[in-house]
Image (cartoon, rainbow, N blue to C red):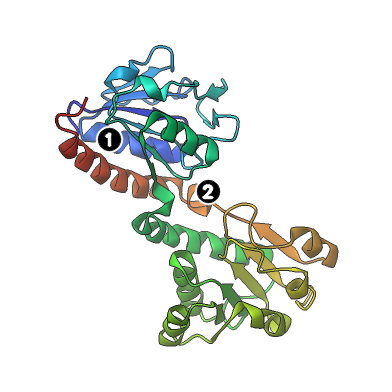
């Protein structure tokens, strides 16, 4: 249980509601910033602002999956006001206070470092990424169906990258009857592709392999779908780029060639926000209970 733990949840989208619900069930004391337009009431949760919140009693703050932008602004669909993280605010919190965010940037990392507070990036965790790969794969299937005029079954699909997301996407498409090929440079991932009964090859071979591709799904956060690759694709090829912004595709050249290329990071929050929120809430609750056990004696 999280009894007596004071947790601030700042901004976010529908995924945050599942986090609020879960932490409320665990008896956490919740302060909600950026939820002034939220109608739902949660036991133990109180709407606050940075000015009304007692920061000196906080044990943790939870930022949205998107974290904050370079201007220190935090996105929230539940508020009509701009939410800006106050400068030096973290320094007023207890030393044991932890910051949880989905992703981070230099601004947030600098804030945490200057205040000497722990920063946990949830999307970098293997467990979160693997859990999220399921709604990502389902969202990818939805996008392929909506943007092609062929069946997935018997189509030629290339998946670049066989990491935590790429593996689930490739396996799901193969189970739907697609002819799936995998792009990976790492020997261990090529071995995994063999075990999954999928042809694999290196990134350098990609230009020679795309001539028959119906769909290319990129999960590598580097410019792998370059002019050299896109110029050899059929014009009907659909590109779905799942890598974090700005993706791994030369979108300008894809448009010039008439290739439909879609940047689609963060699919879990779009196609299945309830499930995506429950995934984060499950991991967060475990981390917060560990934090509660370990913080004893710290001020």
Between marks 2 and 1, how big is the CA–CA gap? 22 Å
Q: Residue at x 36, y 46 (%)?
A: 280
Q: Nearer the viewer, residue 206 or 11?
A: 206
Observer-nearest of 42 and 88: 88
Secondary structure under badge 2?
Answer: helix
Rendered residue at 71%/62% (across/down): 261
Quadrant assignment for the N terminus:
top left
**Looking at the image, which residue is at 34% across and 33% down?**
20
Q: Is residue 63 left or right of residue 96?
A: right
Which callout, 2 or 1, points to the residue nearer the camera? 1
- Is residue 133 something one can see in this rendering? yes
**Residue 142 percent location from the top left of the image:** 56, 61
User: Residue 243: x, y in percent?
Assistant: 57, 59
- Vertical relation: 112 (above or below) 158: above
Quarter-of-image position of residue 228: bottom right
Q: Earlier in the sequence, mark 2 or mark 1?
A: 1
User: Quick check: can you spot residue 12?
Assistant: no
Q: Which residue is mark 2?
A: 270
**Residue 163 circle label:** none
Residue closest to the eye, 84 or 23: 84
């Amino acid at each position: 249980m999280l009894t007596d733990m004071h947790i601030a949840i700042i901004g976010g989208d529908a995924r945050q509601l599942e986090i609020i619900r879960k932490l409320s069930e665990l008896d956490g004391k919740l302060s909600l910033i950026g939820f002034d337009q939220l109608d739902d009431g949660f036991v133990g949760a109180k709407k606050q602002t940075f000015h009304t919140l007692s920061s000196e009693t906080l044990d943790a703050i939870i930022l949205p999956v998107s974290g904050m932008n370079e201007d220190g602004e935090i996105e929230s669909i539940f508020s009509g006001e701009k939410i800006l993280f106050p400068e030096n605010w973290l320094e007023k919190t207890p030393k044991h206070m932890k910051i949880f965010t989905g992703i981070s940037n230099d601004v947030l990392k600098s804030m945490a470092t200057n205040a000497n507070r722990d920063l946990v990036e949830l999307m970098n965790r293997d467990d979160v990424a693997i859990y999220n790969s399921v709604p990502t794969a389902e969202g990818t299937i939805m996008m392929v169906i909506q943007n092609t005029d062929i069946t997935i079954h018997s189509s030629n699909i290339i998946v670049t990258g066989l990491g935590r997301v790429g593996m689930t996407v490739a396996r799901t498409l193969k189970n739907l009857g697609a002819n799936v090929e995998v792009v990976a440079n790492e020997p261990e991932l090529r071995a995994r592709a063999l075990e999954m009964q999928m042809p694999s090859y290196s990134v350098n071979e990609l230009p020679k392999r795309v001539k028959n591709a119906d769909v290319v799904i990129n999960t590598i956060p580097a410019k792998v779908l370059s002019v050299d690759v896109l110029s050899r694709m059929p014009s009907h090829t659909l590109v779905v780029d799942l890598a974090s912004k700005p993706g791994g595709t030369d979108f300008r050249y894809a448009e010039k060639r008439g290739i439909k290329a879609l940047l689609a990071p963060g699919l879990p929050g779009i196609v299945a926000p309830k499930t995506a929120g429950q995934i984060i809430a499950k991991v967060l609750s475990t981390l917060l209970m560990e934090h509660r056990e370990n913080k004893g004696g710290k001020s």
